[in-house]
Amino acid sequence: MPKTKDEKLLDTETAFDQTARMGNAWQSVGQYEKQLELPVHLVAMDEDDDLILVKIERDGANVMGYRTVCGLALGGEGSTTRGKQRGEGTLRSTDDRDDATCQACLE
Amino acid sequence: MAGAAFAAIDSTAGAAAPKTQIGLLAATVRARVRGLRIGNTAATSAGGNRFVLNAVSTAGTKTDITAANTKLDPNSPSPITVASSTYTAEPTSGVTTEDFGFDRVGTYILWYPPGAEPFVTGATRLALQKTVGTETDVLAGTLVWSED
C-alpha cells in the first residue's frame, strides 16, 4: 500500500512544525498523537488559583488574556490575521503542575 | 471581537465518557454560545450518547486553539475567548446549562434562539462534555460563539 499524503507528512515534519502549520486542524490519528508530544505548559495563576489577566497583543491591539508561566499567550499573540502566523497559538496547557512538562514553566 | 462570530472544531480524541470535547475560556468579553454540532464519524450500531454544556471550574490539560483559526470571517479580529480541545485530563465539573442525548449513529445539531444563549463571562469556562457513552470512536464537533 502506498503511503497516504498524511502519512508522508508525518515522516517529514516535526510535531512543532506541524502544529505551527496546521493549527488545530488535526485530521488523522497520527497527527493527534503528534499533538500529544508537544510540551504541556502551566497556566499562570495567583495564590488563590485564579487565572491572572494580563495584556496580550492580538492583531495590533492590546487586549486582556492569559499567559503560561513561561510567557506564552493562550490562543496566540501578534498578528494572527489570515495565514501568516495562524498556527503559533496552538499549545498544550494545564493548571495541574503534575501534568506540566515545559521546563521553563516549572523552574 | 465585538460582534464577530467564531467556531472551534475538534474531530479527535475518541474516548468513553467522561470526555470533554471543546472548552471556552472568556476574558474581558462576553462569549455568547450560538450553537453546536456533534456527531460520530464511525459508528455502525446504535448506542446512547449524552452531552452537556458545563461551567467547569478548572482548566484540565488540553490544546489551546490558535485564536485566528476560529474566525468565521477571515477579515474579523481574532477572538479574546480562548477555545480548547484534545483534553487528556478532565476539568472539574460545575453547573450544567445544557443537557442532551442522541443516538451515536446520528448527529446532534443545536442552534440557540437569539436572546436565550448560554454566556461565558469573566475568567469563567464552559465545556462541551460527553457524560454518557461507552464508544471510543472519533467524534466530530463544532462549537460556535460570538463576542459582545
Image: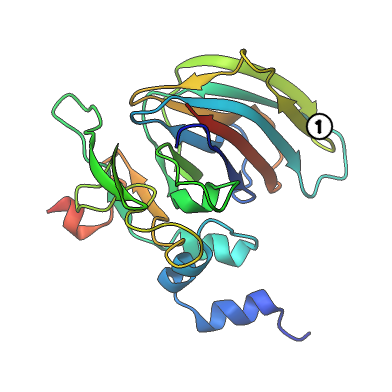
Look at mark 1 in the image and give the residue it sits on. Answer: B47
Camera-nearest residue between B95 and A85: A85
Residue B80 appears in the rendering: yes
Q: Write the residue at 23% across / 41% down.
A: A55
Q: Write the residue at 67% across / 32% down.
A: B36
Please state the horizontal and vertical placement of residue A106, each as a whole percent of the image: 17, 51
Chain letter behind tag 1: B
Q: Write the residue at 62% across / 27% down.
A: B34
Please state the horizontal and vertical placement of residue B18, each as a whole percent of the image: 57, 31
Camera-nearest residue between B76 and A50: B76
Q: What crowding class fits label 1: few (fewer than 14 Cα within 10 Å), some (14-19), or many (20 or more)?
A: some
Left or right: residue A20 compared with residue A45: right
SS for dot 1: loop
Please state the horizontal and vertical placement of residue B92, each as a whole percent of the image: 41, 25
Q: Residue furthest right?
A: B45
Residue B65 appears in the rendering: no
Left or right: residue B8 compared with residue B37: left
Q: Write the residue at 61% across / 35% down.
A: B144
> Quadrant location of residue B91?
top left
Q: Amino acid at mark 1?
A: Gly
